[in-house]
Amino acid sequence: MTTGIDIAIDSRLADPTLMKQAAYIDGEWIPAPARDGLVVTNPSTGATLAVLPAMGTAETKDAIEAAERALGPWRSRSAIERSRILRRWADLIRENADDIAIIESAEQGKPVGEARDEVVYSASFLDWFAEEGRRVYGDVIPSNSADARIIVIKQPVGVTGGITPWNLPAAMITRKVAPALAAGCTIVFKPAEQTPLTALALMALGERAGVPAGVVNMVTTLDPPAVGLELTTNQTVRKLSFTGSTEVGKILMRQASGNIQKLSLELGGNSPFIVFDDADIDKAIDGVVSAKFRNGGQICTGANRVFVQEGVKDAFTEALVRRAAAVKVGDGFTAGTEMGPLIDEAGVAKVERHVADIVDKGGRVLTGGHRHELGRTFYEPTVISDLPRDSLPWYEETFGPVASIATFADEDDVIDLANDTEYGLVAYVYTHDVGRVFRVSEALETGMVAINTGRVSNEMAPFGGIKQSGLGREGSKYGIDDWLELKYINLAGLSR
């Protein structure tokens, strides 16, 4: 095993100091021991990028204690002071977007241009919540007594925790840290084991922006259950925000129940992508390519089941097959690459299991369906027709570049099909019938609905799901609420 920074990646960076081989606790960068640690590799090549500390319960406690010490001074700062720091942090991210994109592409595998888009997107949450933190308003409520007043104020929850996934390692950090800091909270993060380098690069910029020691802490680990257990059972931590699988979310929820800990959970999805016969087929194809093959299909908002009305099935399917077959697969740094590798062998194995199950139950592979000739964890963009209702992708998130198509007859039919899942994150609907837009959107059991677009995420909108897709919302004016507590003050005995 090669240790240390991959020279080829390091040489690409304008500022190599952003490539951190250390965790971050209480304002200190903590390197890994000489040999043992969390090894971060490039999924495209298998090359070692960095070795980070393999922290556990003790270090997580240290980080929590640091966050507790920093809480009082941070929450006492005015909203405008916190806002200025967040704005500086956002500016630094944009100024260093090329370098962070290189780091992210190296450890996550996505095309470097796509990574850069995500990095710029991540800065938008810092901008947004820099302003929302200044608009944390309370209320004065009329009292039933002439000598009393009812006052409601909002205060920071306190010390918080964040656990983020590997698929969007920049955006998932800022979508949590921005509202936390804007509200006056401090936070302990555990970035994903596969992609901690992006998070640490962002933290380096946060430090430069003036984030005080202890306000944000990052723990790297080879033992995520131990870190998660400490974040959910330590009585100092009053809230946890987690983005990841529903299975892990349920574990964290059970653990957090002991302290009645406040939770935000952005969990799995099984998104229906619905194409009615009056849709613009070309735009629908653009949408499904974006919602299915972007990031190799490794996004929680990915189109997992594609429902096409019977009258346009052939035209839609033929066009999608052509587009999927033309997607350029390759290393994230290769010019023209549109889709990189899957994150690891387990991810490929799941895709293979899903494809095999569909075929065994009557589905037909129209293009793709195999590992890519590039080897490792590269997989072909795949289109499958005749998706059976009893197949794995109907009930599980594939999390890979497989577009599985089923047909439907009418609105009632597709609403029944789309809602036949325990998940409820997002649905996509393509139609030009305005009445249908409202009927279908209101009937779909999802937290978000995208009409005539394959994208739903932005900092101004409340991102989140219902059912087993999670609790709470991130982004928008609603996104800061989960980081605040309401306090009711009953002020009586006023002189008249």
Image (spheres, helix red, strand yellow):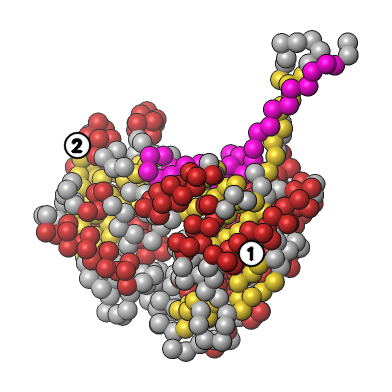
Residue 213: in magenta span: no
Q: Nearer the viewer, mark 1 or mark 2?
A: 1
Q: Which residue is mark 1?
A: 62
Give the structural element (helix, strand or loop) at label 1: helix
Residue at 37% in and 43% down: 468
Residue at 64% in and 64% down: 62
**Along the horizontal axis of the image, is 19 left or right of 87?**
left
**Along the horizontal axis of the image, is 275 left or right of 259?**
left
Residue at 49% in and 76% down: 38
For the residues marked 1 and 2, what is the alpha-carbon distance in whole angstroms?
Answer: 58 Å
Residue 484: in magenta span: yes
Q: Which residue is mark 2?
A: 409
Q: Where is residue 355 drawn, in percent x and y?
A: 21, 62
Q: Which residues are magenta?
A: 465-494
Q: Image quadrant of residue 350?
A: bottom left
Crowd class of label 2 (few under 14; some 14 to 19; many from 20; radius 10 Å): some
